[in-house]
Amino acid sequence: MAHGAGSAAVGGAMSGILSTGPGATNVQISLPPEALRPVTEVAAPPGLVNVPGHSQVFVGRGDELAVLRKALKEPGTVVVHGLGGV
């Protein structure tokens, strides 16, 4: 259930784009199949070879994880959003 101006609720097997609020704009571009190549065929630009590898260790978020664990035990809905791994 959503409340208030510009609110929306989506559930089930729904998928797509949802925009709310004044001036909201969506642009969708469809590329032809020949425009897409396998990653193995695309050369990386110079300098990307020094990007550090992915770390399997997740540190520095103990307080935030404790708050999340507590919220998950409470009745109601918990929404977590943001960039993964940040």
Image (tube, rainbow, N blue to C red):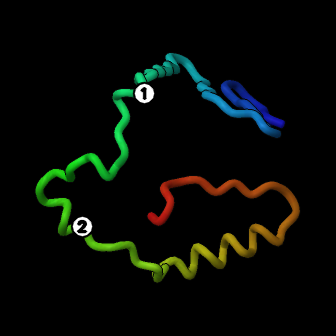
Residue holding disc 1: 33
Crowdedness of circle 2 by 10 Å Cα count: few (<14), some, many (20+)? few
Q: Three-letter amino acid code at disc 2?
A: Val
Q: Say left or right for 24 vs 6.
A: left
In the rendered image of this protein, does residue 70 appear above or below residue 10? below
Kindly indicate the quadrant of the structure image that contains residue 86: bottom left
Q: Three-letter amino acid code at disc 1?
A: Pro
> What's the residue at 46%, 82% (across, down)?
57
Kindly indicate the quadrant of the structure image that contains residue 80: bottom right
How many discs mark residues in the rendered view?
2
- Percent x, y for residue 53? 32, 73
Q: Secondary structure at mark 2?
A: loop
Task: Give the alpha-carbon distance from disc 1 to disc 2, as whole Å.
Answer: 30 Å
User: As drawn, which residue projects farthest toward the left?
Assistant: 46
- Percent x, y for residue 69? 72, 75
Crowdedness of circle 1 by 10 Å Cα count: few (<14), some, many (20+)? few
Report the quarter where the N terminus lies: top right
Q: Say left or right for 82 vs 65.
A: left
> What's the residue at 36%, 27% (across, down)?
34
Residue holding disc 2: 51
In the rendered image of this protein, does residue 1 appear above or below residue 17? below
> What's the residue at 66%, 26% (across, down)?
6
Q: Return the residue nearer the eye: 73 or 13.
A: 13
- Percent x, y for residue 24? 52, 20
In the rendered image of this protein, does residue 1 appear above or below residue 83? above
> In the rendered structure, which disc, 1 or 2, sits on the residue that comes first in sequence?
1
Disc 1 + disc 2, Cβ < 8 Å? no
In the rendered image of this protein, does residue 24 appear above or below residue 40? above
Q: Secondary structure at mark 1?
A: helix
Q: Say left or right for 19 vs 49.
A: right
In the image, which is nearer the foreground, mark 1 or mark 2? 1
